[in-house]
Amino acid sequence: MSVELKNIKKLIRIQIKHKIITLLIFSIISGIFSVFSVINYLKDLKKYDVQFITNLSDSTLIVSLLFIPFLCLLTTNILSNKEISMYPGTIKTRFTSRIITDHIYIIASYFVIFTINMIPNLILVFARLYGFPLNLSMLFDIKYFLIGFIIYVSLSFMIYMAFTILNMLLSRIHYLVTIGISMTIFMLFKYEVFNFEEFHYAITSFFLKQNIEVATLVFRALLVWIILLVLAYLLTFTVRKWQMPLPQSKVFTIYFIEFILFMIISVSTEFVMFDNGVSYEEFLESEDPNNEKSFYMDIPENFSPADFNYHTNFSDSKYQAYSVNTFAVDYEKALNNKLIIDDVEIPEGQMYVNIYTPTISINGKELGNNIVNSIDIDFTNNTIVYPNKDELYVINHFLGNLCLFEKNYSSGSDYINHDEDFYISIMIIYNE
């Protein structure tokens, strides 16, 4: 092993020891928020004030994503890191060791976020064992965990390197010049010398938009990361000596500029991720035929059509999870009102039963068919049997709704926008 590689290895070990406290503080803060989120959910559950589908991390997502901006801000000292300034090494070995260390921290931060978010998941497992009406079938999702890892790491690598280069440049010029450059760029956009919105959208939508495909997103992010990594290394050739620590006034100026940039990035993410969705026609084409159940049967002796004409919000359910529309109609009337097509024939003495829900999915998994298959009709007592009417679905999208980046994602069927509109329709057409 060469002297440079040995030096880099030693410097990495030193920096990891120095920075472990940063990761621990982040872990504690994230852990507190995650535990409080599940405690608040269980409290709301006791008060029957919960949604049919609840995302545990709705209020804690921002905490999970704070580590990367914080790490980026720390790179203001990447050319003047006093933690390693007293150890032997060249500009390039010190810089390389810092880059490798921070990338290790980025990977480690995902597993910290993952582990912390498994704590509330496990609490809910025990809550279910103690009788809470929770359906956890969508809570532990291997696909989400894997997609989350590759997206989180690739985007974090890219963002980190972009801010690293920015910090290298800003640290080498006077902070008044920095302010002047920032004001000039601001004025160019303000007076529309450049169209800020188009520029903004073009950059962000290159990485984040619906149906982009996860592989495309990751490939683009890693490609840009490699380019930035090479550029950052080449910049070290322009540095002749290890710099003195930056004055606080300059550090605060850089922090202010980068805070504004992070705000723009966060707004861009929210804007682009919920833009460029599928059309209504595409949504109809994507409707899952499995979320309905139909069958023919003989008309029971005690069948009473009037008992099956009602709309309910599960008045006998504490949680009022979703509405149910049930109606029974004569075959001739159904034909006249075009409830069924003319080709459908119902023999005399029989009836046609159709149970349907609109498409609703979590991480690309269709949920409606599970509910439809659990419903039965008790024609002896003229009632609908809902064995799982009190069950509430819980998920933990601790990195946001990553499913929307998949090729066939349909915003029309996503639970985020449609769980409040979820319903069950039961149609009975009889021919007496």
Image (cartoon, rainbow, N blue to C red):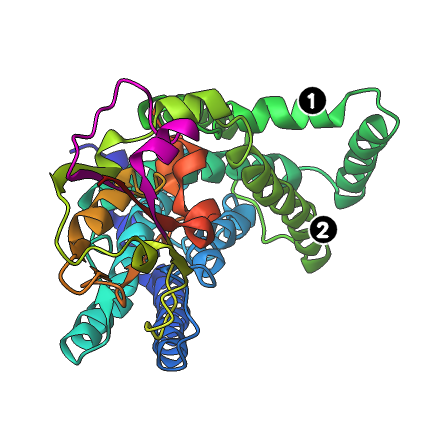
Where disc 2 sits, the SS reads helix
Residue name at image x 15 percent, y 39 percent = 349
Q: Are marks 2 and 1 in contact (CB under 8 Å)?
A: no
Instruction: For marks 2 and 1, give the CA distance.
Output: 28 Å
Res. 312 visible in picture? yes
Give 252 or 319, whichever is nearer the viewer.
Answer: 319
- Disc 2 marks which amino acid? Thr
In percent of width and height, residue 412 lies at 45, 35
- Disc 1 marks which amino acid? Glu
Give 225 or 389, whichever is nearer the viewer.
Answer: 389
- How busy is the neighbourhood of tag 2: few (under 14 within 10 Å), some, or many (20 plus)? some
Locate residue 326 relative to residue 293 in the image: left or right: right
In percent of width and height, residue 255 lies at 65, 52
Q: Residue 54, located in which quarter of the rendered image?
A: bottom left
Query: Which residue was labeled with disc 2?
Result: 253
Residue name at image x 45 percent, y 46 percent = 418
- Say if the magenta span includes residue 55: no
Region in magenta: 326-355
Res. 90 visible in picture? no
State the quadrant of the C terminus: top left
Query: Which residue was labeled with disc 1?
Result: 198
